Amino acid sequence: MSSYRVFRASKASYIAAAFGLIALIFLAAAPWWAGRADMRLLSEIFLYLALASLWNLMAGYAGLVSVGQQAYVGFGGYMLFAMTMFGGLSPLVAIPFAGLLGALISIPVAMLIFRLRGAYFAIGTWVIAEVFRLSFAQVSALGGGSGSSLPAKIVTSMADGREAREALSYWLALGIAVVVIAAIYRFLRSRNGLALTAIRDNELAAGSLGIDIWWMKFVVYVVSAALTAMVGALIFLQKIRISPDAAFSVNDWTAFVIFIVVIGGIGTIEGPIIGTLVFFLLRETLADLGTIYLIILGLVAIVVMLKAPQGIWGVLRSKFDLQLFPLTYRVQTTSSNKGGEQ
Amino acid sequence: MDWLNAIVQGMLLGGLYALFAAGLSLIFGVMRLVNIAHGDFIVLAAFLGLATTTALGVHPFVAALFVIPAMAVIGYALQRGVLNQTLGDDLLPPLLVTFGLSVIIQNALLEVYSADPQKLNAGPLEVTSIPVGGLSVGLLPLLTFGVAVMVIGGLQWMFYHTALGRAFRAVSDNQDIAQLMGLNRRHIFGLAMALALAVTALAGILLGVRTSFDPASGGARLIFGFEAVIIGGLGNLWGTLAGGIILGVAQNIGAQINPGWQLLAGHIAFLVILAVRPTGLFPRMSG
């Protein structure tokens, strides 16, 4: 008589979890060991990691390929500025509110652009981002087309002294990256996550099993918009200056993010993490090349898409059957004559 | 009178938008490919026009005789070399590859020409205008509109009255059966992209004569073309012309109310049409 057991975690995932925890403690302690420039770079890495993970949730799992996520990055940034400058809110309170407003505005947007399919959906999201950019450029209270800076008294109100402020802003960036990845991980392990994975693998089959595809996609879109707006608020809290062109830049907030996800491996949690590391490694080594660097980045993304569409992590996973964030179930049969372990 | 003028100028501007859209519509119709780099190809054509006019000292319209075949060759090579590998059921590969192309073209142009705005000089043609019933209509916008009507009429005729058009429609309907009938779809797709970029070349030259352009101005051109396609309805070339006209008129009316609202008014017109008629005004096929 053979029995079997179903499990998710593997030795690799336990080791990864242990290393991840150590790395997290080490990174959380950065204000005590890292210089200011390093902390700025790390913050930027965390914020890109959060954006890439969210884009991956949309494109890699829900099939929502957006080239307009800059709409929510910029919206979150502008909401932070508006609420702190005119609402008198502390930036720490304004960040979650920016997320909430991002979710609210994404609802009518989703209802409108979900009418477009596939690649036309993608360009539709870009139109929305343009509408946001042009609209905020009309708001003279926020500096119109030339933008505005966060008043010094708001910046200094965050914490006492420059070092404490920089540490706080660093922890916020680390925090949002951890929150985003943990939320995606929890979500994908849940019942709804299974439904979403089914949609990713075969939309028609998922629909015939009773999954409400429109609703699942809608939820993913709204939640991603909310979290992206919070990331946007943090990005512009660090920059202290906002303008329509910077806030709604398709290159900065969407093109780079897409390249990160594609190079790292779309449709996996690990992919955006690896992609972010590769992206910053390339950027720090090739930044002196200026525009040539961007051409190389575009070429790398095209080659990866054509030759290894699963990205770096996809190649590693298929070679070594690895999964650092255990999402899938595995079945192991244990036949009775091999001893009664279970 | 200002309003009538805004509407007439907007209609003529719509011809240029229809030219932006025609190439996009053609390749979507034949191979269901949406080219994110389409706007950057328009700008690339304008820069090629600039290179030709400065090198040979010729008029931009003469330069078009060089730029159109050059873009067609680029289109064929690109389709056979790269884009054919991305076609299939999965939406992501063509989208991401053309997105990568967009970044490459933009930065290559930036490297060669810097971010300074450039313009093609068409001489006295740019300022010549014809009085029409109290309005003064520019010769150049009128010419652009005429070219757009001829291009769309030509494409329409090609689609329904030539062997090439029949091949395009065949691979559009069913690639596998077309292949069985002896058509090489890879070659047909290459020809479709060559034709699309030839139209794009014309659009780029006319854009460059009309306004200044820089390496970053491709994104907006893609969006205008896309909006014209969706407003007009997928797969309908004359609808695309109507879509371009609606977009151009909306922009000019917006600008008439407040100069800052020009682009916003165009986008809002698009979103309103998307809300009330999601399939566009004159749809021929489903997306």
Image: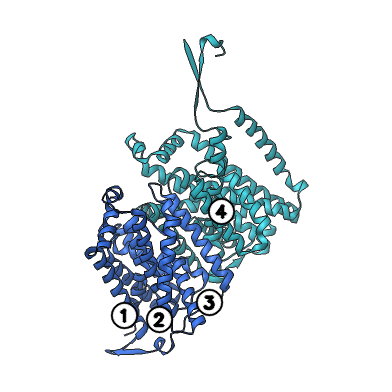
Chain colours: A cyan, B blue
Q: Position of residue B226 (x, y in %)?
A: 38, 63
Which class describes the residues within 10 Å of circle 2: few (<14), some (14-19), or many (20+)? some
The residues bearing labels 1 and 3 have C-alpha atoms spaced at a distance of: 27 Å
Amino acid on which disc 1 is placed: Val
The residues bearing labels 3 and 2 have C-alpha atoms spaced at a distance of: 20 Å
Instruction: Report in which chain the residue with disc 4 lies.
Output: A
Which class describes the residues within 10 Å of circle 3: few (<14), some (14-19), or many (20+)? few
Q: Secondary structure at mark 1?
A: helix
Residue A76 in view (yes/no): no
Same subunit, labels 4 and 3: the answer reads: no
Same subunit, labels 1 and 2: the answer reads: yes
Residue at 37% x, 89% y: name it: B128
Would you name the residue on which mark 4 appears? Answer: A300
Residues marked 3 and 2 touching at CB (< 8 Å): no
Same subunit, labels 3 and 2: the answer reads: yes
Instruction: Report in which chain the residue with disc 2 lies.
Output: B
Residues marked 4 and 3 touching at CB (< 8 Å): no
| Badge count | 4
The residues bearing labels 4 and 3 have C-alpha atoms spaced at a distance of: 29 Å
Residue B214 in view (yes/no): yes
Q: Secondary structure at mark 2?
A: helix
Of labels 1 and 2, earlier in sequence is: 1
The residues bearing labels 1 and 2 have C-alpha atoms spaced at a distance of: 24 Å
- Give residue B117's mark: 3
Q: Nearer the viewer, mark 1 or mark 3?
A: 3
Q: Quadrant of the C terminus of chain A?
A: top right
Of labels 1 and 3, earlier in sequence is: 1
Would you name the residue on which mark 2 appears? Answer: B61
Would you name the residue on which mark 1 appears? Answer: B8
